[in-house]
Each structure stands twice: as structure tokens, then as C-alpha cells.
Amino acid sequence: MPNTLLTIDMITKEALRLAHEKATFIGTINRQFDDSFGASSGKIGDTLRIRLPSQYTLREGSRVMDVQDSVQVSTALVVATQDGVDMRFNSRELALDLDSFSQLHLEPAMATLMSNIDSKALVACTKSTFNFAGIPSSTISSLTTPGAARTRLNQNLAPKSDRRLQVDSGTMASLVTGTAAYFNPSNAISEQYREGLVARTAMADYYENERIWTLPTVSSDTNSSMKLNSTAWISTLGQTVLGVTSVLNPNIPVGTNLTIAGIYDVHPETKQQLAQLKQLVVVSTAMATSSLTILPALYMSGPRQNFGSVYTATSLALSTLSVSTLGAGAALYNTSYPLGLMYHRDAYTFATAELPLMSSAEKCVRRTYDGISLRLWQAPDIRNDELLTRIDILYGFAAIRPEWGCRLIGQNAN
């Protein structure tokens, strides 16, 4: 039986339910910092400093103490982006039952809102992720590439629970076709209403998401001419600036993965050098001044050491090591490829703040569920017999442990 008039509280709760359901990516990452924003007491502004675990070096083979200073490293989570959808309804539309109203009005509105927020968060977190698995010229049609991504997470000591994988439908189709025997219906009851959940295998929940980022390759295949120059590297503010020389100064897009010959990854705790080269990602380019800014920052020694090399600090500064970008080569010239993402929940975080309730507004309601806070505000337009409605969300996101994520790279066969 239809309602005489839908209440603002009913509409807000239904909007929040739809937002939660459609949060394909942000619904699977860390949201434990949400309560720090928008509280009625102790407001912290729009920036939260998230402290990361301290790192130490081992005292080995000696009973004499070697006391170390505790260097506290932090990253910033900024909650300063306000998005929303704006609608108008007349009296007839507001007289519908809730199911019809949701289907006709709220669902498309919330789909637009959450799809854009989900896309911005997923793209930004993917661009901040430096680990990668896969071959650009190959299709991801088996568990080999997800298995390699799983290995990268293990090597960086990511917990083996709460892992997720986001890929587009073309890649998912190739995976399911090639590995159908491994895919079984998911029994993740807590996630059963999350849009995009397909199955679980290889220690991760698999999500189908059309919002994943597609990376264009470099516009030139002459990357072999790019070398570290004598300025070498300077690590600061969590990033490293590489001085490079190149004959043609190829245009390298932000988000491009690269490796440097002779610089290898290490175990995060033992600092034992591993077999693979250190994987890096470009976060800004300034080829006019022959520099690239990359993540992560490179540290050669001490508790934050994250690479090993046959070079000393002095010889590395004077070396001409080849810098190789992923996707270089004539076969991939002007080719783009979608980047899937495997990650632990705590690799990235998303937070919403509680927007204020306007004291002069008769109909202004705020509701929060599972880390997503929405405010719905209505005001009448008596001339046109309409009710103006706005739905707002104030949010932010950050890659707080990007080493616990790994890109899946491959061509799309569909």
C-alpha cells in the first residue's frame, strides 16, 4: 500500500543502503579512521596524520646494546572533497511507495554518486601502487598473474586475510574461462550484497569493476636510452627524485611502472636481497629538467632500507644504470592496458566526515552506516509544487600501505 508521503528519514536510509551496496572498491578497504572527522567535540580539521609502524635494525652477535632512535613515519589522509547529487520531486512522485521511488529516482542518483567516488578512489590508489605482476603483451587468462600478485603481497608481509582483487569484466571473463574449475560460489556472507563480488580463489575475493584505471604506455619505445645521471637519487618526503638522461626525453605518463638495473628488492625485516628488481612507480614527471619523481622512496641502509645493490652509495651516484619502463617496445607503441589491483584491506583507507545539520533547515537528516556518512537536505518550492533535494558526502582517501597492493597488468582480450 503506498505511503501518503515519503518521509526524509525513509529516503535517507534508502539512499545510504544503495550507497553501501554500490561501493565496489571503497567498501572493501580500511575505514577505521572515520570517527576522527566531524565529531561534535575535538574536531581535527580536514587532515588526519596516520602513523605507520616504526622500523629497526637487528643487533646481531653482540651483547652490547646498540640503542636506536625511533623514527615515526606518517602519512596524511585529507577529507576535503564534497560531492553530491541534486534532484527535485513533485507531490505525485513523493506519494509513491518506497520501492518505486527508489527504483525511479534514488537508485540512478546513488549509482552516479558512488560510481564517481569509487572511480576516483580506485584510480588514485592504483596510481600510488608500485608493485606489479603480469606482462603487458599477454592476456590474464590463468591464475599465474594473480598468483604472482599474491607473491608480491606475501613478500611485503601483507596479512593473508582480507585480500581483494578488482578487475574489469574483460579480464574477469578471461580468468573465468581459463580457470573455471577454481571458481566457486563465494561464501563471504558479510559481502553478499556488495556489488561486483564474483567469487573467491587464490586467497582473495574477486570483484568485477568497470572503473579500474587504464594506463597508456609511453609515447616512445626508446626508453633504453634513459639512464640515471650523476645526480642519482635524493629521497625526501616519502618519494625519490631521479635525475635521468635521455636522447629523446620520452613522455612518461604518471602511474608508469619502472625498474632500475642493479637495484633489487629486499625482505622488509631481514633486509636480505631478493631475486627481482625493485619495482617503482612514477608519480610526477618533469622531463624538461630531466627528472622523475617515484614511489617508494629509496633507502640503501638503516631500518628503512628497501633495496639492495652491488653498488655502494658512492658508486651508485656515479653510475649510468638503465631505467626500464613497463610497456616499452615497438610492439606496445601507443597501446593502453587496464590495470587490475590485488590488495589487502589496510593498504588503502577511505573516510567520510559528518556534514553539519543546518539549524535553519526543517528537513536536514544525516545518517552513517559502515563508514559512509550521507546528508540529505530538502526544501520546498511552493511556486512549482516541488521539493528540492540534495544528497551530499564529504570524503577523502589515501594509500597508507601501498606495498600491500599489487597491480595486475595485461591486455584485454575482449
Image (spheres, rainbow, N blue to C red):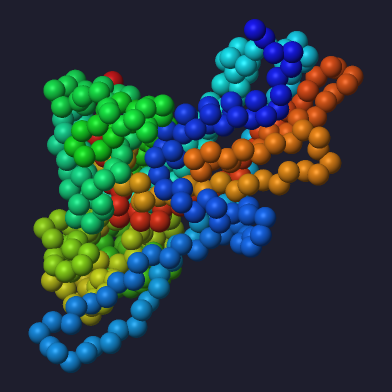
* Relative depth, front residue between 136 and 372: 372
* Relative depth, front residue between 12 and 250: 12
Residue occupying image coordinates x 73% and y 43%: 357
Residue 227, image x, y percentages? 26, 62
| Residue 337 visible to an observer of this rendering | no
**Residue 113 picture quarter:** top right
Residue occupying image coordinates x 13% and y 61%: 274
Q: Residue furthest front?
A: 1
Residue 398, image x, y percentages? 46, 52
For this view, does 313 lie left or right of residue 281?
left
Residue 286, image x, y percentages? 44, 58
For this view, does 364 lie left or right of residue 16?
right
Q: Residue furthest bottom?
A: 64
Which image quadrant: the N terminus? top right
Residue 20, image x, y percentages? 49, 32
**Residue 374 picture quarter:** top right
Above or below — where is 223 with respect to 2?
below
Above or below — where is 364 with respect to 6?
below
Which image quadrant: the C terminus? top left
* Relative depth, front residue between 393 and 263: 393
For this view, does 190 lie left or right of residue 182?
right
